[in-house]
Image (tube, rainbow, N blue to C red):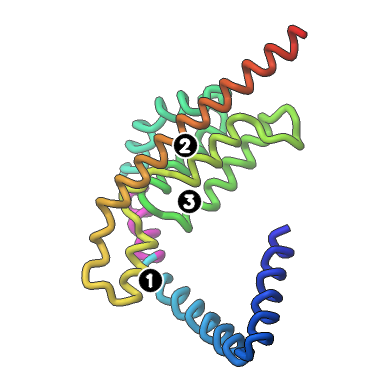
Amino acid sequence: MMNFIWFSLFMSGIIVAALTGRIHMVTEGVLTGAKDGVFISLGLISVIAFWLGMMKIAEESGLIQILSKRLRPFATWLYPSVPSDHPAMGALIANMSANILGLGNAATPLGLKAMQELQTLNGTSDVASDAMCTLLAMNTASLTLIPATMIGLRMEFHSKNPGEIIGSTILATLIATGAAIILDRFFRRTEQIRCRRRNRS
């Protein structure tokens, strides 16, 4: 589906450029975009390497374990259907810790691992469970204390103060996380009521 959407956007851009006599701008845009993509990717390597190193230090110093211990009651409340001793709970807490520390690239494989573990608890393999929907919502709107990737991008584009977005990022992600939790609980509750009515009829 996504390939179809991207292909449609690409082809519509070429057609519009051809009709308006600006086909040369397509070539310039493609080459410039590819160059910027490589430039930004290489620049982010240093930032990601730095924060992964910090993450390793935090892990060795016990900071991750402390953070995980603090997050466990919240994770248990957020994912009531996941047993506290199941590997999925550990993966969920690790994913939450990485997101809070702003390690978006490092959080992705942890999120995939958590989703994989949640699938083992899912009764219907072709329908996402409540916990899987909650994980998706929390990953999309996760509270972030240190937006490392965005700071790295601002550094790449020579921002005078790359870290000035920390306060606004915390506020925005705090509101987004609160909204995600409220909507997740609302739709979960609505689905439970709908199922009860369906069983009675």
* Amino acid on which disc 3 is placed: Ala
Q: Quick one: SS at disc 1?
A: helix
2 or 3: mark nearer the eye:
2
- Mark 3 Cα within 10 Å, few/some/many (few <14, many 20+)? many
For badge 1, the amino acid type reads Ser
How far apart in space, not on screen, are marks 2 and 3 (Cα)? 18 Å
How many marks do you count on the picture?
3
Q: Amino acid at mark 2?
A: Ala
Which disc is residue 96 wearing?
Answer: none
**Pointer 1 residue:** 46
Residue at the location (31% across, 43% down)?
63
User: Which quadrant: the C terminus?
Assistant: top right
Q: Which residue is mark 2?
A: 180
Q: Nearer the viewer, residue 91 or 30?
A: 30
Structural distance between the alpha carbons of marks 1 and 3: 17 Å
Q: Is residue 16 above or below residue 149?
A: below
Residue 49 within the magenta-colored segment of the rendering = yes
Q: Between 11 and 52, which is closer to the camera in this rendering?
A: 11
Q: Where residue 73 sits in the image (x, y, percent)?
A: 40, 25
Sequence-wise, which precedes: disc 1 or disc 2? Answer: 1
- For the N terminus, the image quarter is bottom right
Magenta region: 48-59
Residue 182 picture location, percent across and down: 46, 29
Mark 2 Cα-neighbour bin, 10 Å: few <14, some 14–19, many ≥20: many
Q: Residue at x 43, y 44 (%)?
A: 142
Label 1 to label 2: alpha-carbon separation: 32 Å
